Amino acid sequence: MAQMSYLEAGRLALAEEMRRDPRVWALGEDLGRGGVFGQYRGLQEEFGPERIVDAPISEAAIMAVAVGAAMAGTRPVVEMRFSDFALCAVDELVNQAAKARYMFGGQCRVPLVVREPIGMWRSSAAQHSQSLEAWYVHIPGLVVLAPSTPADNRALLKAAIRCDDPVVYLEHKNLWPLRGEVPDAEEVAEIGRARRLRFGEDLTIVSWSATVHAAADAAEALAEEGISVDLLDLRSLWPWDREAVLESVARTGRLLVAHEAVRVAGFGAEVAATVAEELGVPVARLGAPRVPVPYSPPLEAELHVRPEAIAAAARRLLERRATPCDPQRR
Amino acid sequence: MIEAEAPRDLDRARLVTLFRVMVAIRRFEELALEAAREGLVTGAIHPSIGQEAVAAGVCLELRREDYLLSTHRGHGHSLAKGADPFAMAAELMGRKGGTANGKGGSMHIADFSVGMLGANGVVAANIGIAAGAAHAVRLSGEDRVVCCIFGDGAVNRGPFLEGLNWAAIHRLPVLFVCEDNGFAATTRTRALTAGPGPLARARALGIDGLEVDGNDALAVSEATRALLAEIRGGNGPRFLHAKTYRLCGHTQADAGTYRSAEEVEEQRKRCPIARARALLRGAGLDERALSALEEEARAPIEAAFAAARAAPWPEPELAFTDVQDFGAEAPTRTPESAPWRR
């Protein structure tokens, strides 16, 4: 086991896949000098400017080139710099990459990975802080992954690069320096499998990306009060691990979903609705209020889903009766 | 009847080939419109009647292994690249055996077996994709050229700038073809477009090219050949601006009220098929030989439409295939309960 950061683990995964498969290449702005966060540092030195390609600030072209290059037999890894900038390339991702295989009747695959750094980080404000995973999960044809640990960033990015579907790969900017154990052996994650952080019996908490760590802190605090939490990190948002979530909630009888994205129509709504439909148990969601992300630290802090809020929501959920037709439900 | 004297150096064999392909394209779209009138083509089609010289002149110069990316008005391009007319006709009618088994329709025809990487329903979207296909050709060390055909409306979208810029900075083997029929959907493009035109915009990005009469099949063919030679010589992308005119509506539902009948009649005198026919007549082919050529060109198209009309519907389960490997949803209805099934 080696200790490394989330950022280093992603870089290791890309380097390993580029050594393994000459069809893999990366394109994006400032990649030659290591990428805006350093997640590509040293790669152009190893693989050359033909495979670590510096792109103009042309998100639509970057994505479209990746679509064409993927259809023509290569496996591009697209860097979007900030997930917010990927909105300049929505046609290329949603109308082209996600649809080509289907609308051409299976004549092609579009095996590209779009790396989109997400999330609130250092007063980045409204155009550099968003978590828009729910948009992508809504689009048939796309796979959506959101790692929360260094080990997962390596294993999931490797799985994404080997996947023949277009993959939206969401890395949280606040997690770049997070250090953790990464296995020495090359691990390729199984897409669609959740990771259980702790086993519990009183309620299930489902989360992903950076909010997993807030949920883990909340579960720790709740344990001290004698409340045992079954905590799942989805890791893969499409496909998502329905079986693991349903198995867990069938045991605990209650579900809380916590994510950083805006709560309204967030992916937590899909998870909660599925559990309510299948099991009829009390569910709750935590997410950001429906406001743009502000700049000033005390304002930005208003939006964060903190461990205290998760623990409080868990206590409220436990006070509710576990019958689906309870008239007292709010 | 257009009279024309054949120039002394006329490449008659090439013109015969161009003529046959143009006649086939025209017949395909006439039969597509007929099928649409009968309700057999359920979605929109965008015919290219009057523009056949661009499709034939450009695509016949491509090799089978070269890639082609086309537009919503792409029937002619696909046919000239060698796509199967039955599969195309069946696709228009949403039938099994169509290029996508009826999952794409007219705007999403593709035939990867002949390098036809897809028509596109979004104007200018194919430009960046073409640059990407060419980038893959470069990375893989393959000997192919990518041809990207788009309309005059596309030059006002951002991907025109971004895609041409990408191809230019990487000196990629792409032939960009602006098939200029004068209308962005149903509005005159010149009223919507600043500056001296598409080729000037390409040249501003360092991409040289040619302007050509897009209703002169031989001229399109010769210009394409010259530009492809430069591209194959490793000189980077080139640009062809072919000026033509759409004699039919924007779609089968467009009566063309934004232009006068006189204007269309005047343009009909420039019909590329009639012009090629007159040239061949002047070059010594008699009426019988020309009629025989036309019959030969039309027959496989007519057979294709007859077969497509008789083709079965796709099984309802096909709605659920080829979505994605991970997380694909299973069919939710039994075939018997599918309400659209006839």
Image (cartoon, coloured by chain):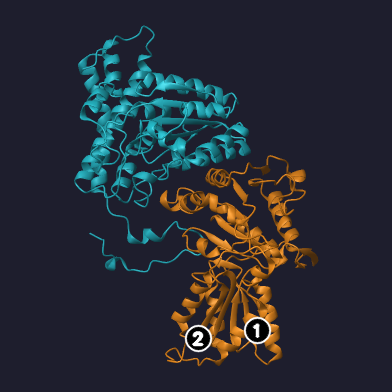
User: Can residue B69 be seen at all in this image of the molecule?
Assistant: no
The chain to which mark 2 is attached is: A
- From the top left corner, tell me how far across and down residue B311 is, in percent: 27, 49
User: Can residue A152 be seen at all in this image of the molecule?
Assistant: yes
Q: Residues within 10 Å of mark 2 (few under 14, many from 20)?
A: many
Q: Name the residue at 62% across, 33% down.
A: B169
- From the top left corner, tell me how far across and down residue A138 is, in percent: 48, 63
- From the top left corner, tell me how far across and down residue B319 is, in percent: 37, 59
Residue B219 found in image quarter: top left
Front position in the image: A262 or B294: A262
What separation in Å lies between label 1 and label 2 (alpha carbons)? 19 Å
Which mark is first along the chain, 2 or 1?
1
Which chain corresponds to the colour cyan? Answer: B
Q: Which residue is mark 1?
A: A199
The chain to which mark 1 is attached is: A
- The type of residue carrying mark 2 is Pro
Which residue reaches farthest right? A2
- The type of residue carrying mark 1 is Phe
Q: Which residue is mark 2?
A: A282
Work out whether A132 lies above or below B195. Answer: below
Quarter of the image that includes the N terminus of chain A: bottom right
What hue does chain A carry in this figure? orange
